[in-house]
Amino acid sequence: MIRDLIVKCRSYRRFHQEVTIEIETLRELVDLGRLAAAAANLQPLKYTLCNEPEKNGTVFKHVAWAGYLKDWRGPSEGERPSAYIVVLGDTRICKSFGCDHGIACQNILLGAVEKGLGGCMIGSINRERLRGDLKIPAHFEILLVVALGKPKETVVLETVGPDGDIKYWRDSEGVHHVPKRRLEDIIVT
């Protein structure tokens, strides 16, 4: 059921790093992104696939993790993603990418959940350094990085409390709590 996939499709930030993700699996996930709607059907998105430890390490050092968790600099060695998909916008096709990459990445992450994997869309990227290290040509805009792996953490959804605080947090057991606004609070009549 689609609701079950959506509920399981959380932003995971700790993984069983030793569980590899084959390049063919990454290709299957990108294929789900390829099938997403695109403004004017221009289909300007391109992808760089990373599943080798050295290349993963390169990507890892250029992304920032979980802005609300001030004392956490990201997953430690052994809990890092097994793979990444770097999402690019081809400026030779168009100059603005709207929400195309968000839609495509959601398809990718839903496909990952269906395969027993999880991931996190990351927008906090040192783009120029990543471009240089991965030798990404200048005509590609780096839009997002999708971190992927077998989740090593539990993420639970809960209702935003009376104080209205929407910041996610971790408890003493390492469970990641994500407050969500109530349906009644987001529908404007």
Image (spheres, helix red, strand yellow):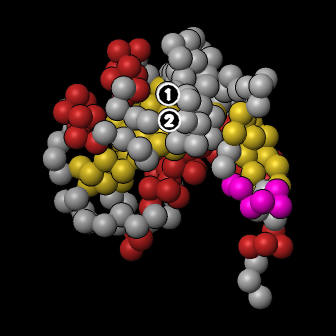
Kind of residue sitting beneath label 1: Arg
Element type at mark 2: loop
Foreground mark, 2 or 1, reads: 1
Most foreground residue, 25 or 77: 77
Image quadrant assignment for residue 176: top right
Q: Going by the picture, which residue comes out furthest to the left? A: 138
Three-letter code for the amino acid on which mark 2 is drawn: Trp
Tags 2 and 1 touching, CB below 8 Å: yes
Left-right relation of 64 to 111:
left
In the image, which residues are magenta? 161-166
- Mark 2 is surrounded, within 10 Å at the Cα level, by few (under 14), some (14 to 19) or many (20 or more) other residues, namely some
Q: Main secondary structure of the magenta part?
A: loop
For label 2, the residue is 65
Residue 160 drawn in magenta: no
Q: In the displayed structure, would residue 116 be above or below residue 98?
A: above
Q: Image height check: is 97 above or below 17?
A: below
Whether residue 148 appears in this view of the structure is no
Q: Which residue is mark 1?
A: 73
- Residue 178 pos. (x, y %): 73, 46
Q: Is residue 171 left or right of residue 121?
A: right
Q: Is residue 177 visible?
A: yes
Which residue corresponds to the image point at 73% horizontal and 25% vertical from the top-left? Answer: 174
Horizontal arrangement in the rendering, residue 180 relative to residue 123 (left or right): right
Q: Position of residue 107 (x, y in %)?
A: 58, 50
* Relative image position of residue 133 (x, y in whole percent): 22, 28
Q: Residue furthest front?
A: 163
Res 68 → quadrant: top right
Q: CA distance from mark 2 to mark 1?
A: 6 Å
The label shown at residue 175 is none
